[in-house]
């Protein structure tokens, strides 16, 4: 039983990270209908910046959470700037181009960011300094470490905040209006360009936090880490219904739990025929199954946010 | 391809003949290929191997090389195989096309094995400084050599260490599904079972993974005395860290892929107490170890893993050429297979398969932040 609970906790931690990244995909898709493939690499930039700051401060004697806090407060503006520039330079000129053009551009931006990161931080795996003691709390037979606890709590707070922002504020109203019909929104006095910039910046801020979590949790960062992470998060967004905020959160959590359970129990369930090497295949199998029965994702149909 | 290959060999031969017929007095060029992953998660190890080759070449060139009465100069052609089997065959073909006289590489077993067929077809001798998988020399190619102890010997030594020294009764095995990781893990598993250990789990990951919490948790539930990992340091380091973060206190044993300074860097304080093996003797016990460390660190910095071996592999190629009085692979290959020389890592001579004779295995533990050889 405690192994099950532990796998569940692992899954929720992984899922929280996926959710934060998936939100970035879903926000942009919801408003522009664009799949921003460079989003995973913005997570990487967040991870790299946090890691660099943490390394600089590792010997300063500051407590771990403070170092991490400073790291993420540096990473957020950095990622916001990158996100803004990417939108301004790469996507805005293609706003009215056929849909394929921005998609290809997104892949190009992704490669560009990876190569820039490789030039700045090198090709090697970088290790995150051990700023948290390997301390664990017992939760009903399973253990949860400080960093796992921080990841779950902070991503829950951020997701709740984002939900509120979209549903309750004037900015959220404007974002939803832009999503429904950019031209009518303009007529109603919404600055569509500003709103789209804000969307990118918002998604990038979430990506920065996700990057901090990934690098601190797994203790490692490298220039091409964003690719697989982005792919998984994109999968999570599709699983939940792309364009739907709650869908991205649900999809991320589900994908994390499925992966974790798949790795943990696939061998036992299939009597040793399939082992943990099928962990990724299992996650995508579930995705296919969901899409067969609900083509627009788990929560895809309930939205009124998409045109 | 079938038409192309003889043509390429012929081109290479013409090129070589051209090299040899240069007018006396001027140096002729001996091309040696050096292949290792120079980008990606294993680049630090690949670069290390490449530097070993370059150090050897610089030394030979500085002391003046004479082959068959003519002055010669070594030129190193470095290629990046990205630790990827497909890329490995592409760069191997490229080196064959460029007419190399011999190859030091590749770094990984997974890349050395597919590439060895290409060198064998072209008749070009290949010495791997670091591919330990048994299959590498088991294919019956005459051109395939290695200067490093193979996994058969290493797996047996690891299992014996786990049973006799660590007294592990239950073991869990994780491998990264590469030719090397799977090979060493299977050898270890086979020997450990034969020695009476119970295998409680065999889990899998990949050579690009960073998250091991799920497989570690499932192993944690079975509480083995020891976890063996067959794979590279870029995974082993974070794995060890995540293991300790999950509150798992059992012994961690790796093979040569884990035994690098990078492992300690990536695992941080969690690295303390980890065990790993490495083929051959520890650097300070190698006959030429001390001098090599001085030369290497002065030029390239810290030694990662296999640079002494790539140095020896280069020396073995050049010595065979010198003794045969020719850089023609067909003429110096028979000499290479019977070579007897004293290398940095110990005496170099090959058995009928191309494996190093009298290969040693040493076990290490991380103590006070560095790998310490166990007696």
Image (tube, rainbow, N blue to C red):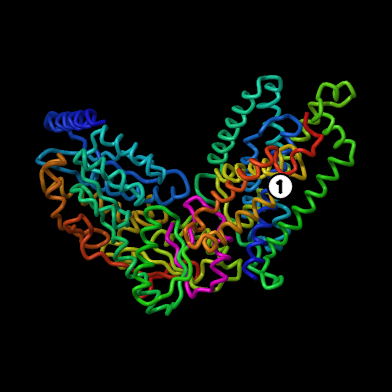
- Report the residue at 12% width, 30% height from top: B21
Callout 1: few (<14), some (14-19), or many (20+) C-alpha neighbours within 10 Å? many
Identify whether B12 is placed above or below A149: above
Q: Nearer the viewer, residue B83 or B182?
A: B182
Residue B297 location, quadrant: bottom left
- Report the residue at 27% width, 38% height from top: B75
**Residue B61 percent coordinates (x, y):** 24, 43
Image check: A42 left or right of B164? right
Q: Nearer the viewer, residue B17 or A44?
A: A44
Q: Is residue B96 in view? A: yes
B220 is within the stretch colored magenta: yes
Identify whether B19 is placed above or below A7: above
Q: Which residue is mark 1?
A: A20
The chain holding disc 1 is: A
Residue A236 location, quadrant: top right
Image check: A80 left or right of B87? right
Q: Is residue B367 in view? A: no
Image check: B140 left or right of B220? left
User: Which corner quadrant holds the C terminus of chain B?
Assistant: bottom left
**Residue A13 percent coordinates (x, y):** 67, 57
Magenta residues, start to end? B203-231
**Residue A200 percent coordinates (x, y):** 73, 35
**Total label count?**
1
**Residue B108 percent coordinates (x, y):** 36, 51
Q: Nearer the viewer, residue B286 or B165?
A: B165
Identify whether B269 is placed above or below A248: below
- Report the residue at 51% width, 70% height from top: B272
- What secondary structure is found at the residue carrying circle 1? helix
Image check: A140 left or right of A171? left
B344 is within the stretch colored magenta: no
């Amino acid at each position: 039983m405690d192994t099950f609970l532990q796998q569940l906790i692992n899954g929720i931690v992984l899922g929280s990270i996926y959710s934060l990244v998936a939100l970035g995909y879903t926000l942009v898709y919801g408003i522009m209908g664009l799949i921003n493939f460079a989003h995973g690499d913005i997570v990487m930039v967040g991870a790299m910046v946090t890691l660099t700051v943490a390394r600089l401060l590792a010997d300063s004697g500051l407590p771990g959470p403070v170092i991490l806090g400073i790291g993420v407060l540096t990473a957020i503006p950095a990622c916001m700037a990158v996100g803004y520039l990417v939108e301004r330079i790469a996507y805005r000129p293609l706003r009215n181009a056929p849909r394929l053009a921005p998609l290809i551009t997104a892949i190009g931006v992704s490669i560009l960011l990876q190569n820039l990161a490789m030039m700045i931080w090198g090709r090697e795996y970088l290790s995150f300094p051990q700023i948290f003691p390997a301390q664990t709390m017992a939760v009903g037979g399973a253990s949860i470490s400080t960093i796992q606890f921080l990841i779950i709590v902070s991503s829950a707070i951020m997701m709740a905040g984002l939900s509120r922002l979209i549903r309750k504020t004037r900015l959220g109203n404007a974002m939803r209006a832009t999503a429904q019909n950019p031209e009518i929104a303009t007529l109603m006095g919404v600055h569509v360009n500003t709103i789209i910039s804000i969307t990118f910046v918002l998604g990038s801020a979430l990506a920065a936090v996700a990057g901090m979590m990934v690098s601190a949790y797994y203790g490692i960062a490298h220039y091409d880490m964003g690719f697989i992470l982005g792919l998984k998060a994109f999968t999570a967004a599709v699983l939940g219904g792309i364009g739907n905020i709650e869908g991205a959160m649900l999809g991320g959590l589900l994908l994390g739990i499925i992966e974790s359970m798949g790795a943990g129990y696939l061998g036992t369930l299939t009597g040793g025929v399939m082992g943990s090497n099928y962990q990724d295949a299992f996650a995508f199998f579930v995705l296919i199954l969901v899409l067969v029965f609900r083509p627009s994702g788990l929560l895809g149909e309930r939205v009124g946010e998409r045109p | 391809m079938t038409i192309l290959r003889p043509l390429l060999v012929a081109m290479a031969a013409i090129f070589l003949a051209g090299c040899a017929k240069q007018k006396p007095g001027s140096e002729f060029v001996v091309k040696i290929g050096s292949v290792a992953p120079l980008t990606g998660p294993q680049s630090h190890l690949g670069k290390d191997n490449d530097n070993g080759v370059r150090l050897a070449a610089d030394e030979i060139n500085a002391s003046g090389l004479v082959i068959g009465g003519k002055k010669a100069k070594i030129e190193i052609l470095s290629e990046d195989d990205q630790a990827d089997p497909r890329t490995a065959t592409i760069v191997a073909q490229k080196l064959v096309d460029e007419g190399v006289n011999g190859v030091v590489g590749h770094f990984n077993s997974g890349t050395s094995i597919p590439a060895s067929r290409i060198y064998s077809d072209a008749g070009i001798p290949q010495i791997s400084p670091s591919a330990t998988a048994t299959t590498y020399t088991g294919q019956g190619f005459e051109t395939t050599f290695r200067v490093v102890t193979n996994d058969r010997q290493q797996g047996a030594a690891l299992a014996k260490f786990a049973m006799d020294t660590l007294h592990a009764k239950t073991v869990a095995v994780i491998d990264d599904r590469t030719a090397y990781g799977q090979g060493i893990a299977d050898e270890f598993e086979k020997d450990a079972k034969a020695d009476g250990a119970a295998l409680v789990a065999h889990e899998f990951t990949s050579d690009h993974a960073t998250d091991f919490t799920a497989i570690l948790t499932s192993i944690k539930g079975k509480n083995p005395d020891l976890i063996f990992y067959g794979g590279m340091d870029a995974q082993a380091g974070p794995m060890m860290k995540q293991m300790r973060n999950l509150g798992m206190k059992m012994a961690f044993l790796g093979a040569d892929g884990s035994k690098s300074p990078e492992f300690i860097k990536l695992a941080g304080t969690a690295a303390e107490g980890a065990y790993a093996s490495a083929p051959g003797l520890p650097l300070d016990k190698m006959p030429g170890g001390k001098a090599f460390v001085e030369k290497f660190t002065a030029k390239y910095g810290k030694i990662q893993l296999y640079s002494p071996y790539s140095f020896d592999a280069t020396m073995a190629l050049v010595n065979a050429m010198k003794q045969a009085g020719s850089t023609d692979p067909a003429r110096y290959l028979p000499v290479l297979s019977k070579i007897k020389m004293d290398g940095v890592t110990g005496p170099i001579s090959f058995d009928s398969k191309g494996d190093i004779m009298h290969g040693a295995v040493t076990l290490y533990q991380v103590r006070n932040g560095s790998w310490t050889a166990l007696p």
